[in-house]
Amino acid sequence: MPQHVVVIGAGVIGLSSAICLQEAGYSVTIVARDFPTPFEIVDPQTQINYTSPWGGAHNRWVPPHPVPGPERDQALREHALSLSTFKRMEALAAAQPAAGITFMPGIEYLESPGPEYVALTEVAAAELGMPGFRILRADEFPDARVAWGCEYRTWCVNPMVYCCFLLRQFVLRGGRIFKRELRCPDEVFALHSDLGTVNAAVNASGNGFGDKNMSITRGQTCIVTNPCDATVTRQNADGSWTFCVPRGFQGGTVIGGTKEPDNWDPEPSVDVRKTLLRRFAATYPRILDSSGKLQFVRDIVGRRPTRRGGLRLETERAVGGNVVVHAYGLGGRGYELSWGVAEEVVRLVRSELEGRASKL
Ligand SMILES: Cc1cc2nc3c(=O)[nH]c(=O)nc-3n(C[C@H](O)[C@H](O)[C@H](O)COP(=O)(O)OP(=O)(O)OC[C@H]3O[C@@H](n4cnc5c(N)ncnc54)[C@H](O)[C@@H]3O)c2cc1C
């Protein structure tokens, strides 16, 4: 009999982890409060803490800091996870055209580039495995405030098309789902009548359960109907961001966006929306329609699950020796790192359960 793993959470991290665990031969159940649905019916108020629907979501390569130290180590670790995710996205997009993934150019403009960007030559980018990387010439910048720019090949997803696809794959492979709200990860080991014996749990709850290092980073973006031929990101000298993420699959294009630590306001600001639209139109006028406009559809407010010290990806022996693998706190990079995190979850579960089996 295969061992039984319960994944808590049906965001992009829980779904990817559940599929990878199935591929590794485990019997898997997902227990979650929220499951993917069409984007049009996700509730902006009651489901604001379910982050996956509100993400862009694109892959933006983040170069590691050139000076050795913890910051560089963390960035290299995350870069490895993003490379694993990229490979899997490429394979999925080729094999499953309906999965919600689109490959396109990624363009970056920086007004005040940090040392990690200044050090990023085309040779260094090739060594880091960034496909199609090219440094832009100054005459390709949108205006004189931009000091550095690059382009590369990358992917975007339409989040709820993609997450619904993952959920269907999981169920078609025999996965079970339970809609429940839990008080702590340990609770799944007590739900015998619903779940049977549980050999391990994966905490993919986004925010963990009461982790003191967790907070949120509010993001306000909006959707326009204008299509766009690239995902474009501009880092402004004042620390603000101007970006677009084409969602594909009739999801329009996301124009963003804010990054506001510890701001819990669920309401979008009309003034912020106007600023986001104006700034993006100035940076990338190719997106404008024949009347020179962006066609606004709706605002988005989401909460990136941000963790001081970075994501938590490790095993804990909980009460009574129960095995809990934590995989949460992905901040603004959940999609980018998803398959890399899921592969690491399998490695952690396997090493705990195989280690335990050999001790029995
Ligand atoms: C505006 C914005 C733009 C973003 N853009 C990008 C981007 O371009 N690229 C990118 O990679 N990322 C982006 N992100 C970040 C990305 O969306 C998140 O990192 C990702 O969605 C987190 O996924 P998750 O599975 O960890 O958490 P979630 O999606 O929040 O899922 C958590 C799951 O756990 C369940 N759960 C939680 N608590 C309980 C409980 N007590 N009991 C039962 N179930 C529970 C929830 O119901 C849900 O199913 C963006 C985020 C925002 C807000």
Image: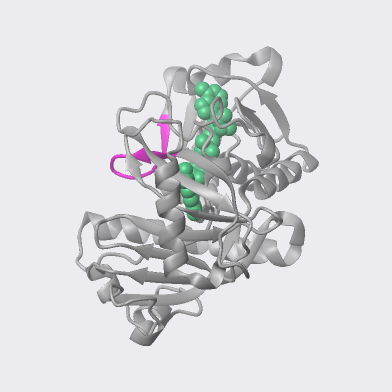
Going 53% across and 17% down the picture, which residue do you hit?
187
Picture quarter with the N terminus: top right
The x and y percentages for residue 257 are 42, 51
**Is residue 98 rendered to the left or right of residue 34?**
right
The x and y percentages for residue 260 are 33, 42
The x and y percentages for residue 345 are 51, 44
Q: Compared with residue 153, is residue 320 higher up or lower down, i.e. above or below?
A: above
**Is residue 355 rendered to the left or right of residue 224?**
left
Q: Compared with residue 226, is residue 166 higher up or lower down, i.e. above or below?
A: above
Instruction: Please state which of residues 205 and 241 is positioned toward the viewer in this rendering.
Output: 241
Going 65% across and 45% down the picture, which residue do you hit?
160
The x and y percentages for residue 214 are 34, 33
Q: Quadrant of residue 212?
A: top left
Question: Is residue 308 part of the magenta span, yes or no?
Answer: yes
Instruction: Please state which of residues 324 and 230 is positioned toward the viewer in this rendering.
Output: 230
Q: Quadrant of residue 115?
A: bottom left
First to last magenta residue range: 303-316
**Residue 241 seen in this snapshot:** yes
Q: Compared with residue 63, is residue 211 higher up or lower down, i.e. above or below?
A: above
- For the stretch drawn in magenta, the main secondary structure is strand
Instruction: Please state which of residues 312 and 51 is positioned toward the viewer in this rendering.
Output: 51
Going 49% across and 37% down the picture, which residue do you hit?
352
Question: Is residue 195 part of the magenta span, yes or no?
Answer: no
Q: Quadrant of residue 346?
A: top right
**Is residue 45 rendered to the left or right of residue 78?**
right
